[in-house]
Image (cartoon, rainbow, N blue to C red):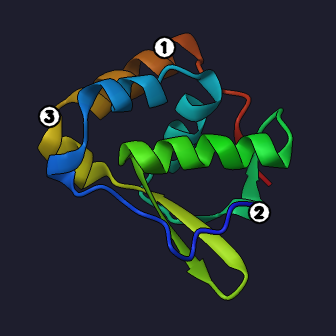
Amino acid sequence: MVDVRDTWHPDPDEMNLTEVMSALSDPIRVGLIRLLSDGEERGWGLLRAPVSKSTLSHHLRVLRSAGLTRTRMEGTRCFVVLRRDDVQSRFPGLLDAVLTAADNQSVGSEVSLA
Protein backbone atom coordinates (compact mmCIF):
# COMPACT_ATOMS: atom_id res chain seq x y z
CA MET A 1 0.00 0.00 0.00
CA VAL A 2 1.00 3.59 -0.55
CA ASP A 3 2.41 5.61 2.32
CA VAL A 4 -0.13 8.43 2.62
CA ARG A 5 1.20 10.08 5.77
CA ASP A 6 2.79 12.83 3.72
CA THR A 7 0.30 12.93 0.87
CA TRP A 8 -0.38 16.10 -1.00
CA HIS A 9 -3.94 17.19 -1.72
CA PRO A 10 -4.35 20.03 -4.23
CA ASP A 11 -6.22 23.13 -3.12
CA PRO A 12 -9.45 23.62 -5.09
CA ASP A 13 -7.89 26.42 -7.16
CA GLU A 14 -5.03 24.05 -8.10
CA MET A 15 -7.38 21.38 -9.50
CA ASN A 16 -6.91 21.01 -13.22
CA LEU A 17 -9.85 20.02 -15.44
CA THR A 18 -7.77 17.71 -17.65
CA GLU A 19 -6.39 15.88 -14.60
CA VAL A 20 -9.87 15.51 -13.12
CA MET A 21 -11.28 14.24 -16.42
CA SER A 22 -8.35 11.85 -16.81
CA ALA A 23 -8.96 10.52 -13.29
CA LEU A 24 -12.62 9.97 -14.21
CA SER A 25 -11.74 8.09 -17.41
CA ASP A 26 -11.45 4.69 -15.74
CA PRO A 27 -14.51 2.60 -14.74
CA ILE A 28 -12.93 1.50 -11.44
CA ARG A 29 -12.25 5.11 -10.45
CA VAL A 30 -15.78 6.12 -11.46
CA GLY A 31 -17.04 3.26 -9.32
CA LEU A 32 -15.02 4.54 -6.38
CA ILE A 33 -16.47 8.02 -6.88
CA ARG A 34 -19.98 6.52 -7.05
CA LEU A 35 -19.34 4.63 -3.82
CA LEU A 36 -17.99 7.72 -2.06
CA SER A 37 -20.68 10.03 -3.39
CA ASP A 38 -22.79 9.52 -0.26
CA GLY A 39 -20.26 11.68 1.62
CA GLU A 40 -19.16 8.93 4.00
CA GLU A 41 -15.50 8.42 4.74
CA ARG A 42 -14.45 4.84 4.01
CA GLY A 43 -11.52 2.75 5.14
CA TRP A 44 -9.47 1.42 2.24
CA GLY A 45 -9.91 -2.10 3.60
CA LEU A 46 -13.66 -1.88 3.02
CA LEU A 47 -13.35 -1.07 -0.70
CA ARG A 48 -13.80 -3.98 -3.11
CA ALA A 49 -12.98 -3.90 -6.81
CA PRO A 50 -12.01 -6.59 -9.34
CA VAL A 51 -8.34 -5.52 -9.23
CA SER A 52 -5.34 -6.30 -7.04
CA LYS A 53 -4.76 -4.28 -3.86
CA SER A 54 -1.82 -2.51 -5.47
CA THR A 55 -3.94 -1.53 -8.48
CA LEU A 56 -6.72 -0.31 -6.20
CA SER A 57 -4.12 1.75 -4.34
CA HIS A 58 -3.01 3.22 -7.68
CA HIS A 59 -6.60 4.19 -8.55
CA LEU A 60 -7.03 5.87 -5.15
CA ARG A 61 -3.77 7.76 -5.64
CA VAL A 62 -4.93 9.03 -9.06
CA LEU A 63 -8.21 10.28 -7.56
CA ARG A 64 -6.35 11.98 -4.70
CA SER A 65 -3.77 13.59 -6.98
CA ALA A 66 -6.53 15.03 -9.16
CA GLY A 67 -8.18 16.51 -6.07
CA LEU A 68 -11.31 14.36 -6.17
CA THR A 69 -10.69 12.62 -2.84
CA ARG A 70 -8.95 13.27 0.46
CA THR A 71 -7.00 10.51 2.20
CA ARG A 72 -6.05 10.47 5.85
CA MET A 73 -4.14 8.09 8.09
CA GLU A 74 -5.28 6.88 11.48
CA GLY A 75 -2.61 4.64 12.91
CA THR A 76 -1.98 2.04 10.23
CA ARG A 77 -5.38 2.49 8.57
CA CYS A 78 -6.14 4.72 5.57
CA PHE A 79 -9.45 6.46 5.00
CA VAL A 80 -10.78 8.19 1.90
CA VAL A 81 -13.61 10.66 1.34
CA LEU A 82 -14.94 12.43 -1.75
CA ARG A 83 -14.15 16.16 -1.85
CA ARG A 84 -17.59 16.96 -3.25
CA ASP A 85 -17.75 20.58 -2.08
CA ASP A 86 -14.27 21.39 -3.38
CA VAL A 87 -14.94 19.78 -6.75
CA GLN A 88 -18.34 21.51 -6.98
CA SER A 89 -16.80 24.91 -6.23
CA ARG A 90 -14.10 24.44 -8.88
CA PHE A 91 -16.19 22.63 -11.54
CA PRO A 92 -19.90 23.32 -10.87
CA GLY A 93 -22.16 20.44 -11.91
CA LEU A 94 -19.36 18.14 -13.05
CA LEU A 95 -19.74 15.48 -10.36
CA ASP A 96 -23.53 15.42 -10.67
CA ALA A 97 -23.25 14.96 -14.44
CA VAL A 98 -20.66 12.19 -14.09
CA LEU A 99 -22.63 10.40 -11.38
CA THR A 100 -25.89 10.59 -13.32
CA ALA A 101 -24.26 9.24 -16.48
CA ALA A 102 -22.43 6.53 -14.52
CA ASP A 103 -25.68 5.44 -12.84
CA ASN A 104 -27.54 5.38 -16.17
CA GLN A 105 -24.85 3.24 -17.80
CA SER A 106 -23.86 1.21 -14.69
CA VAL A 107 -20.25 2.38 -15.00
CA GLY A 108 -18.21 1.23 -12.04
CA SER A 109 -20.94 -1.01 -10.67
CA GLU A 110 -18.35 -3.70 -9.93
CA VAL A 111 -16.93 -1.55 -7.11
CA SER A 112 -18.53 -2.22 -3.73
CA LEU A 113 -18.04 -2.29 0.02
CA ALA A 114 -16.91 -5.36 1.96
Q: Amino acid at mark 2?
A: Gly
Give the secondary structure at mark 1: helix
Q: Residues within 10 Å of mark 1 (few under 14, many from 20)?
A: few
Q: Give the residue at x 46% y 51%.
A: 64
Q: Residues within 10 Å of mark 3 (few under 14, many from 20)?
A: few
Instruction: Give me the C-alpha separation between circle 1 and circle 3.
Output: 20 Å
Dot placed on the residue nearer the N-terminal end, 2 or 3: 2
Dot placed on the residue nearer the N-terminal end, 1 or 2: 2
| Residue ID for mark 2 | 45
Q: Amino acid at mark 1?
A: Asn
Instruction: Give me the C-alpha separation between circle 2 and circle 3.
Output: 31 Å
Q: Is residue 12 left or right of residue 19?
A: left
**Outermost residue, top side:** 105
Q: Is residue 14 left or right of residue 10?
A: left
Q: Judge depth for marks 1 and 2 and give the one in front.
A: 2
The image quadrant that residue 107 belongs to is: top right
Give the secondary structure at mark 2: helix
Q: Judge depth for marks 1 and 3 and give the one in front.
A: 3
Instruction: Give me the C-alpha separation between circle 1 and circle 2.
Output: 28 Å
Dot placed on the residue nearer the N-terminal end, 1 or 3: 3
| Residue ID for mark 1 | 104
Q: Position of residue 26 (x, y in %)?
A: 58, 22
Q: Position of residue 66 (x, y in %)?
A: 39, 42
Q: Position of residue 12 (x, y in %)?
A: 20, 52
Residue nearest the observer in this picture, 31 or 17? 17
**Could you say which disc has been placed on residue 52 in the image?**
none
Name above or below for residue 31 compared with residue 38: above
